[in-house]
Each structure stands twice: as C-alpha cells, then as structure tokens.
Image (spheres, grey):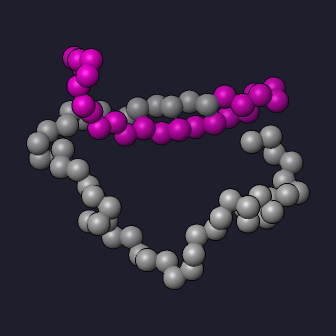
Amino acid sequence: NIQQGEELIVSFDIDARQWQDRWFNSIRAWKVERVTTANASPTTPSSLNIPSSSSPATTVPELIQENANDDLPF
C-alpha cells in the first residue's frame, strides 16, 4: 500500500547481462521501508566519516588527457 508522494527507503540490486551482443540492465528492489521520524534525520556531510585528502582533486582536462586513447562510446 505505497501511496504517491510517500517517502521510502529502497534497497536494490543492479545487474547487467549480455545477450546476442546487446546489454540488458535489471534493477531489483529487495527491501522497501517507510521513512519514519527515527530514520528520517538527514545526514549532513560534516557528520560523515570521510577522510580528508592531501592531494588536490583531478581536474576535467587531466581526465580527458589520461583517457585520450579510450575508445569507449561513453
């Protein structure tokens, strides 16, 4: 009895498989929970345990140069 506009937490698996030189994707939900006040508290980035990086982030031109020989269509 899921209602439109209701907030949910959905756990799912994504799977890709090849068949006759074509790829098909599947998304299967295996757990659906209603958001309650106990699990609705938003997580702020400051509360996450993310280690700080000492090296600067890679810029877009650097990524393009690194992948110049990449022939993937995406």
Of residues 52 and 1, the one nearer the viewer is 52
View extreme (left): residue: 37
Report whether 1 appears left or right of 58.
left
**SS majority, magenta:** strand
59 above or below 25? Answer: below
13, above or below 28, in the image? below
Q: Residue at x 14, y 39 (%)?
A: 36
- Please give the count of numbered marks on the rendered protein: 0
Q: Position of residue 28 (x, y in %)?
A: 46, 31
- For residue 57, what is the image quadrant? bottom right
| Residue at 84% across, 53% down | 70
Residue range corresponding to the magenta coloring: 1-24
Residue that lies at the very extreme toward the bottom in this rendered image = 54
Residue occupying the point 82% across, 30% down: 21
Q: Which quarter of the figure has residue 34?
A: top left
Residue 21 magenta: yes
The quadrant where residue 3 appears: top left
State the residue at coordinates (79%, 64%).
66
Q: Quadrant of the N terminus?
A: top left
* Viewport quadrant of the C terminus: top right
Q: Nearer the viewer, residue 31 or 60?
A: 60
Residue 3 forms part of the magenta stretch: yes
Q: Position of residue 13 (x, y in %)?
A: 48, 39
Residue 25 coordinates in the image, percent (x, y): 61, 31
